[in-house]
Image (cartoon, rainbow, N blue to C red):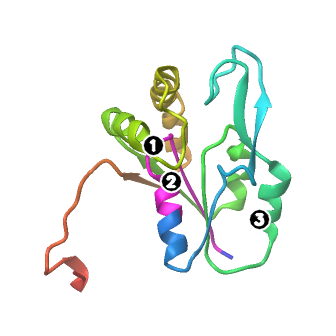
Amino acid sequence: MTRVLVTGMSGTGKSTVIGGLAARGYHAVDADSAELSELVSVPDDALTGLGRGRDWVWREDRIEALLTAAGADPLFVGGCSPNQGRFYPRFDHIVLLTAPATVIASRLATRTTNAFGKEPDELARTLQLQQTIEPLLRKTAGLEVDTGRRSSRSSAGSCGTS
């Protein structure tokens, strides 16, 4: 089974991509959901996604079960967690979604599917992580996609599509 991790900072479009793949019939799972992730206590000085003393991490037993289960091929998993590196050997491809800070800020302020990032301290934390964690993710990714770029399709698109 081919397994693809779609990762990146909050607001880069992971959930949108996973939702789009699922809508097209692919086996696509949002690992940042409450079913597959949980809130945990961490040291106050830990660099975390949620701020001092807490973080949202993958439930390792459930992620392991997801990656082990036979199912539709390929499997797309979307998410970003401090413990995701433990699972890198299980993925055939790692795709990093990125976007400029201004785009991330706008998306976090206007999204309706997730409240994280609307508070000023959460936005600041996300942008800090973009500077510190995103370069680490970039080192492991086989493909980087800038989701902040707008594209348009012409009636005579490339590769014969429109």
Q: Helix or strand or loop: what does disc 1 sit on?
A: loop
Residues at marks 1 and 3, CA–CA distance in whole angstroms: 24 Å
Q: Quadrant of residue 5?
A: bottom right
Q: At which x and y percent is residue 131?
A: 45, 27
Tell whether 5 sits left or right of 59. Answer: left
Q: Residues within 10 Å of mark 3 (few under 14, many from 20)?
A: some
Q: Name the residue at the bottom extreme.
A: 160
Q: Is residue 129 magenta?
A: no
Residue 46 left/right relative to 116: right
Question: What residue sits right under mark 2 in the picture?
Answer: 14
Q: Nearer the viewer, residue 87 or 130?
A: 130
Say which quadrant the N terminus sits in.
bottom right
- 37 w.r.t. 102: above or below: below
Query: What amino acid is found at the position of numbered circle 1 in the picture?
Result: Gly
Tell me what residue is drawn at x 24 percent, y 54 percent.
150
- The residue pinned by badge 1 equals 11
Do the numbered discs 3 and 2 sit on residues whose CB atoms are within 8 Å?
Answer: no
Left or right, 41 with respect to 78, comes to right
Write the start and end of the magenta stretch as one range. 2-18
Mark closer to the chain start, 1 or 3: 1
Q: Where is residue 117 in the image (x, y as percent from the top left)?
A: 50, 33
Q: Please state which of the two labelled residues, at mark 1 or mark 3, is closer to the viewer.
A: 1
Q: Mark 3 points at which residue?
A: 66
- Asked whether the residues under the numbered discs 1 and 2 touch, taking CB atoms below 8 Å apart as contact, a structural biologist would say no
Q: Can residue 83 be seen in this view?
A: yes
